[in-house]
Amino acid sequence: MAYRAIAAFVLSMLVILLYDYFFLPKKHIKQTSPPAVAPVQPQQPKEAKVRSTPPVPLKTEKSIFVPTDSGREIVVSTPLYKAILCENGARLKRFILKKYRQTVDPNSPPQDIVFSDNTTFPLGIRFLHSDLPLDRVMFKADKTKLDLSSQDREKTITFTANVGGILIEKTFTFYPDDYHIDFNVSFINQSLPPFQDNLVVFLVNKWPEDKKDRYGFQGAILWLNDKFEEVKWKDIKKHEVVKTGKLQWAGLSDKYFMTTIVNQVADKATFIVNNKNGLLVGEFLTPPLEITSQRKTVSFLLYFGPKELDRLKKLDYHLDKAVHFGFFDSIAKLLLYVLKWFYKYSHNYGIAIILLTVVIKILFWPLTHVSFKSMRELQKLQPHIARLKEKYKDDKEALNRELMNLYKTYKVNPMGGCLPIILQIPVFFALYKALLYAIELRHANFITYLPFTDKIWLADLSAKDPYYITPILMGISMMVQQKMTPSTMDPTQSKMMLLMPIFFTFLFLNFPSGLVIYWLVNNLLSIVQQFYINRSIHQDGG
């Protein structure tokens, strides 16, 4: 059954490729309206028009593009990041992570996770139906600089503006050792009649072209109705996407970083994502707010930073669900925790991957042992099987009956060769995803330099092997393993299977080197195991 076993692996690889290309089946996205807005009072001041009824269907055509003059810049510096805000709209211009670099070069610039067109920035606000220009007003900040050390407590910056008789305060509270930010928006209606409207908070991003990653992700992510959802950028380019319901958080994300708004108070909210001139714009809509002479405050939690599983888990709000490894997510996260545990002691993720591979191999050793022995027993029966096939070549029913009697007589399970391998496929899927999308592997080095040269090699386990050394070694190891494995195939099938190592080598050429190392080490351990089994059988007279 070696043919079936290898075919199972081939099938799993093909499924992985198809899964990565299409990710999830496309869902038809319905265009839904946001929560209803209560009618306003009939008296309207000249300086601000407030519509009494919402437009149907929903069209968010209001401009979020503001003049290029962004006003004074306010710089916030913490041990983890540097944030630059501007007074025009009290928005965020840049968010630079100090612990992460743009490339594997340690001298490369720190990673900025806010990309825009230099006129449109995140965290602008507006009302959904009112014409009040909240996103285009010049706010005044109570300070222009904020420095936090690891010994400091949280510190706050408040932006204030008066728009058409409404006093607005946008308050940001920063913490020294975390990426989350408390974000409060307060309104005091000083001259308008009381009215209701939905508050809209913007998220904006535009990833550079050189950030395109064949195995990466760019788009919107959200925790909606107790489920994780993602919408890829290529789908958002085609049409506006509206998500509404029990929305815990929503944001924009790439493979490793995210900018997210957490809904702390309201049970329901709406998130709209669309493409505006190549800019990915996310609009977070609250339920209707009552804007009166009494202060009305809406509180959010922002997370602008890396998709670190442990850090997100501590924040709660199901933010750790943003780190999602697909169908076998729970298995992948378990493997990631084990990988990080090995890294804690080895201080090298390449070594951690090797140790994890050894542990997985030990756990599946009994199953693999049974598989190899079963294939060996089946190989012994090949002469009998060939005679039965010749004798009953015109009677398939009789052939199957005689084959089952043969397997029963010699106590051989015909599925024993491939079933153990099939049971390992979920682990392989999970580890594949963990190594591909875990930020811990981003720019994590293994060897750094090619031996006896000054050429950089395996300096980034999330990138492919630049010299294709590990995929070629993987192909050679697969060929050796195939030669050692008992074959139950006819000569034609055997010749066809000789092409499998070549196929897998080409398949792995552009895979992240961390994944190729796992597969290579797994093959080497399988060769050792097969050698041990073959020697044991030989000593026993088999």
Image (cartoon, rainbow, N blue to C red):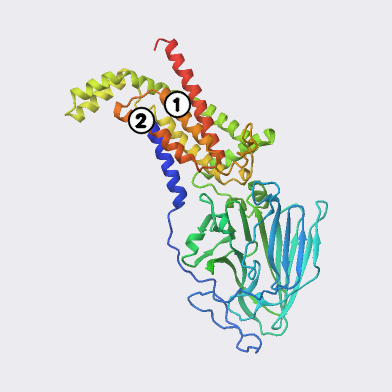
Residue 473 position in % (x across, y down): 51, 31
The residue at the far right in this view is 151
Q: Residues within 10 Å of mark 1 (few under 14, many from 20)?
A: many
Quadrant of the frame with the N terminus:
top left
The residue at the far front in this view is 453
Residue 509 position in % (x across, y down): 49, 40
Q: Residue at x 46, y 65 (%)?
A: 238
Residue 288 position in % (x across, y down): 60, 73
Q: Residue at x 79, y 58 (%)?
A: 154
Where 536 falls versus 106 (above or below)? Answer: above
Residue flagged by tag 1: what amino acid is it?
Gln
Q: Is residue 490 visible?
A: no
Where 412 falls versus 26 (above or below)? Answer: above
Q: Is residue 503 left or right of residue 432?
A: left
Q: Is residue 71 visible?
A: yes
Kindly indicate the quadrant of the structure image that contains residue 204: bottom right
Kindly indicate the quadrant of the structure image that contains residue 192: bottom right
Q: Residues within 10 Å of mark 2 (few under 14, many from 20)?
A: some
Quadrant of the frame with the C terminus:
top left
Residue 63 position in % (x across, y down): 59, 76
The residue tagged 2 is 3
Q: Is residue 457 left or right of residue 499?
A: right
Where 411 falls versus 215 (above or below)? Answer: above
Query: Which element carries disc 1, helix, strand or loop?
Result: helix
Q: Which mark is residue 481?
A: 1
